[in-house]
Amino acid sequence: MILYNITINVTPDIEQDFISWMKAVHIPEVLQSGMFVEHKFYKLLHESEDGSINYSIQFFAESMEKMMEYEQNHAPALRTKTRDRYQDRAVSFRSLLETV
């Protein structure tokens, strides 16, 4: 199993919109790609020095092939939508983990 983890640093002024949009639009669109079998959406429980809030969205793929197919065929357009919506008020970084 491959875990695709996206950690997103969100400014407080967009937090509620971000949560709503992730749940109603973005996560369903990622899942519609058919590349993931499950997802989780978490808020990190720590205070940041700049007052931002951090979220982790985790998608689980059955194989690295599915993950790479997502990266090549689906991720660019979905990332652009998020970037266009939030600009620099939602900054993300991604990690890939493998079950051992």
Image (spheres, helix red, strand yellow):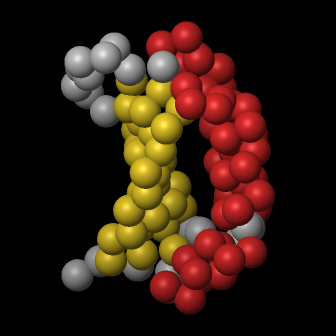
Q: Residue furthest top?
A: 13
Image quarter hosting the N terminus: bottom left
Residue 29 in the image: above or below residue 13: below
**Would you say 16 lies left or right of 93 here?**
right
Pick whichever, 49 or 44, lies toward us: 49
Report if residue 61 is visible in the image: yes
Q: Residue at x 64, y 32 (%)?
A: 87
Q: Residue furthest bottom?
A: 65
Please count the marks in the image.
Answer: 0
Q: Position of residue 8 (x, y in %)?
A: 45, 39
Q: Residue furthest front?
A: 88
Image quarter hosting the C terminus: bottom left
**Would you say 69 lies left or right of 4 here?**
right
**Would you say 50 lies left or right of 75 here?**
left
Q: Residue at x 55, y 26 (%)?
A: 89
Report if residue 19 is visible in the image: no
Q: Position of residue 58 (x, y in %)?
A: 45, 54
Q: Residue at x 68, y 57 (%)?
A: 30
Q: Position of residue 26 (x, y in %)?
A: 69, 44
Pick whichever, 58 or 13, lies toward us: 13
Q: Residue at x 39, y 24 (%)?
A: 53
Residue 15 in the image: above or below residue 82: above
> Where, by quadrant of the figure, is residue 19 drawn?
top right
